[in-house]
Structures are given as C-alpha cells and as structure tokens.
Image: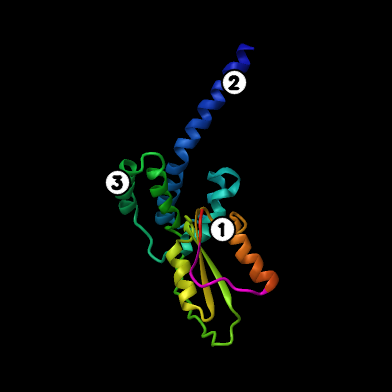
Amino acid sequence: MFMVMVMVMVLVVLGLVLVLLVPHLVWVLVMVAQVRSPPIVPLVPLVTRGGEFDIALATDCNDVQRRMTPAEVGDLTRRWRTAYPLFGATMAQRLLTCGPWPTASPAPVPDPGTQLPPVLVIGTAHDPRGPLENSRRVASETPGALFLSWQGGGTGAYPRTPCVVAAVDTVLVAGTLPLDGTLCPP
C-alpha cells in the first residue's frame, strides 16, 4: 500500500512539472528553430497532450501576419502575468509558436457580383477565435448578407441558444431570413 501511495505522489509531481514546463519547452523549440531552422511544426504535437495544440496552430498563426520576437513575447509575458495572473503568462508564451509559421500574402478576393443568394452571418460576442467585429465586417462586405449577433461566449453559436437555432432553422427549412442586425440574448 505504501508503494502505491509513493508511486501516486511521484506521478502527481511529474504531472505538475510537465504542466509547468510545457510552455517553456515550446519556447525553447522556437528558439532552436530560429538558430538551426529544423522543421518545428511536426514537433509541436510531441510537447502537447494528444496533439490538441496542433489543431489550433493553423488557425491561430494564420489570423495574423506579424510574428512577435522572443523579446517582445518576454515583455508581453511579464505584463500579462500581472494583468491576467491565471493564464496570462502561458497565453503570451504561446505566441512564440507562430514564429516559424510562414506568413502568406492575402489572396485577392474575387468579386462575387450581385447574384449571390442571401447569406446569414452569425457573430458571437465573446468568441476567442472569431471576434464579433470580424463577423460584422464579413456581413457588411458580402453582398446580400444579413448579420445576426449572439451575446454568448465560445466558438460557434449554433445550436447553443434557442434564438440562434430558430433563426438558422427558419433559414434552412423555410427559406425565411431574419431581420438584418438581429440580436440574440446569451
């Protein structure tokens, strides 16, 4: 029984050490990538649980064209550690993972013309991946698009709230569009 308790304690300590070291390990890998240019992207799943981090890498890194230097991230880490004590430092350090990710020039958007069918664009007030203003801008720049805003949080408003479900289902089933600018409560 004593040995089992010792093994459990060792595993707990190892788990805590890994949780504390993973952000630093990613930072070290990025630093190595800048010196020797190894293919770092395939290494990312090795330093995270089940490759979950790799799923968001393309989305996160393609959202911005500018890459932060390690010095800039270090400064941001210090500020965010104070301003956001729970996750600030970790989130700032994760910005380094995009360092080796290539930046692409924005592709020219083809003119869709005026023959597009109506499109319902849904924005979420507290979406960590897609800010509300970005969804609003897509709706304003797309001919025939209508904008619906959900005041909830998280990525994806459908099927989280009856208001959004009713609007989307009505569009898909009956072909009836909601009013442009519809606001759904959380």
Kind of residue sitting beneath label 1? Ala
Kind of residue sitting beneath label 2? Met
| Numbered disc 3: secondary structure | helix
* Cα distance between the residues tagged 1 and 3: 32 Å
Q: Position of residue 168 (x, y in %)?
A: 62, 66
How many marks the image carries: the answer is: 3
Residue visible at 61% across and 12% down in the picture: 2
Residue visible at 45% across and 59% down in the picture: 100
> Which numbered disc, 1 or 2, marks the residue that appears first in the sequence?
2
Q: Position of residue 167 (x, y in %)?
A: 60, 65
Q: Tell which of 37 and 94 is nearer to you.
A: 94
> Which numbered disc, 2 or 3, marks the residue that appears first in the sequence?
2
As drawn, is 44 to the left or to the right of 32? Answer: right
| Region of the chain picked out in magenta, as a range | 175-183
Labels 2, 3: front one: 3
Tell me, yes or no, whether the two marked residues, 1 and 2, touch with CB atoms within 8 Å: no
- Eyeballing the image, is 63 above or below 70? below
Q: Which residue is mark 2?
A: 7
| Residue 174 among those drawn in magenta | no
